[in-house]
Amino acid sequence: MSKKPNIAIRVSNVSKDFLLPHEKTTSIKSGIVQAFKKKDKGIDIQHALRDISFEIKDGEFFGILGRNGSGKSTLLKILAEIYQPTSGSVEVNGKLVPFIELGVGFNPELTGRENVYLNGALLGFSKKEIDARYEDIVDFAELRDFMDQKLKNYSSGMQVRLAFSVATRAEADILLVDEVLAVGDVDFQRKCFNYFKSLKVQGKTVVFVSHDMKAVRDYCDRAILIEESKIVFEGTAEKVADEYLKQFN
Amino acid sequence: MRNAGGDKPKRMLVAENIYCYTNQYYMMSNTYRKYRYSLILLRELVITEFKLRYQGSVLGYLWSLLKPLFLFAILYYVFVFFLKIGEGIPHWPVSMLLGIVLWNFFAEITNNGLSAIVGRGDVIRKINFPKYVIILASSVSALINLLLNFVVIAVFMVLNGVDLSWSALLTPLYIIELLAFGVGLAFILSTLYVKFRDTNYIWEIVMQALFYGSAVIYPIAMVVDKSSDLASLLLLNPIAQSIQDVRHVLISDTNPTLFTLTQSPLLSLIPIGLVIVTLAVGAWYFKRRSPYFAEDV
């Protein structure tokens, strides 16, 4: 692997506004009607993020904490380039793979095998690369007998196992993880734990959004706390977790 | 650029049950990396669409051959058998079938393209990838369909005793022109559809008008008999022009084209100009709006 720069992600003064029409204009008629209604312009500006700045170093486990609706997920989507920031900039050094949700692109009408290739393609794997990993993926998911069945016949637990199994093969320098590990039974949780340990061994950078303070304390080196669209606290995972819990006392 | 180490990556065990593969990523150039991802996606989306299209149907892909054939049979009986349209036009039934197949190709690109971005909304909201791949994938599917349909046309051409001339080699050029026009429109329509869900109703009406205005099920010679200028005007539309040109080069050179009617190279360039402008405007508009699809869709 070639030499990488020291900073994995640099977020500078990022703000994100959403324009929310009172009634979402999805037809030309309502668009025209709204243009004529002077009284009710019908647009609210929601400031999802205000002036967010932080840096994540290479190989760091970085937590993003905050209550529901504080803007964590919006921030994660901006890091993943799914959303464009309204102002400010994001610099990402290295290949970034987002796990906003497991099993992106999974189609119930396709077989488990076909879904592995489709989901893999979205993560940037060519057919050949999946071929090389296919056996591992099936073994890890423990679904060998089900691979040629349609996904709609899978239980939700099986779907998650398959999706996670593909996800663990993603070759990224930076992973964005959004509470995907909140699902699954004890055995599955243990696998996730192993996977996270392996990420540390490999020196990957991980950005981790979670409500689970135990997980944050166990894995994260540093963290930020977001409240009402702003960063209110930054520091070691321990301190930020304490601060987060204070909100509820 | 390929890694000298070969295609099979090396496997290392880094934790219980977790393997790590040697990373070939850094060996690749930036441009290659970018287009590599697009190509991987394009391939997989086309395969998926192919598999899903006739899921659960007994005859499966045969339907994409049977559908135009049945449509042709109906139109043939109505227009050729009863209304006696196209009498005196050499090989008109095959020409009509050819027109229907090309029209369906164009319709498939634009109709599927229109809803493609909204249809993939769930994926767009969760991962960042080059969105134009979605449009290209549905166009490539339509192209595969067209190639299958050309098998049927070839059979009919043989049955009808059509003499192939060397000019038939020009056919792919006109198909590319039609493809480019369709893709350009699909870029515009799919982007509009994200914001305005009226787009598909409007497009349905426009398509009806274009269908009857493009001399698909009646010979353009009928219009020429009334007014040569009107026929030329109709042929300024790239769909009518390319269909008529394919008939000219593939079936019989007695089929009038924009050039044979006007004898003006300049006028004959207008449809091609329209295609280029449509594609350029479509690509520009799509590129400008696509970063906001995740929020708007």
Image (cartoon, rainbow, N blue to C red):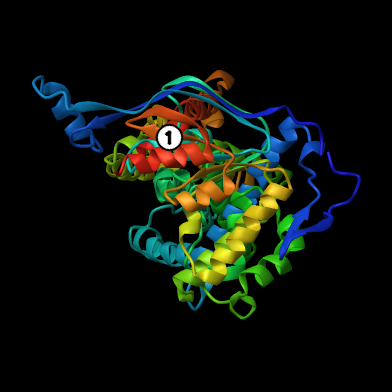
Can I make out residue B34 in this image?
A: yes
Nearest to the observer: residue A42 or residue A86? A86
Tell me which residue sits at (17%, 27%) in the image: A42
**Position of residue A211 in the picture relative to residue A37 (left or right):** right
Q: Which amino acid lies under the numbered mark 1 shown in the image of this protein?
A: Leu
Place of residue A221 in the rendered image (x, y in percent of width and height, measured from the top left) = 59, 40
Nearest to the observer: residue A192 or residue A111? A192
Question: Residue under circle 1?
Answer: A225
Tell me which residue sits at (53%, 25%) in the image: A54
Tell me which residue sits at (44%, 54%) in the image: B87
Place of residue A236 in the rendered image (x, y in percent of width and height, measured from the top left) = 54, 35
Reply above or below: B185 against B268.
below
Q: Residue furthest bottom?
A: A145
Marked residue chain, label 1: A
Place of residue B237 in the rendered image (x, y in percent of width and height, measured from the top left) = 44, 32
Crowding near pointer 1: few (<14 within 10 Å), some, many (20+)? many
Nearest to the observer: residue B181 or residue A59? A59
**Position of residue B259 in the picture relative to residue A67 (left or right):** right
Nearest to the observer: residue B37 or residue A169? A169
Can I make out residue B187 in this image?
A: no
Reply above or below: B95 against A1.
below
**Position of residue A233 in the picture relative to residue B145 (left or right):** left
Quadrant in which the C terminus of chain B appears: top left
Q: Secondary structure at mark 1?
A: strand
Quadrant in which the N terminus of chain B appears: top right
Reply above or below: A35 against A170.
above
Q: Residue furthest left?
A: A39
Place of residue B145 in the rendered image (x, y in percent of width and height, measured from the top left) = 56, 57
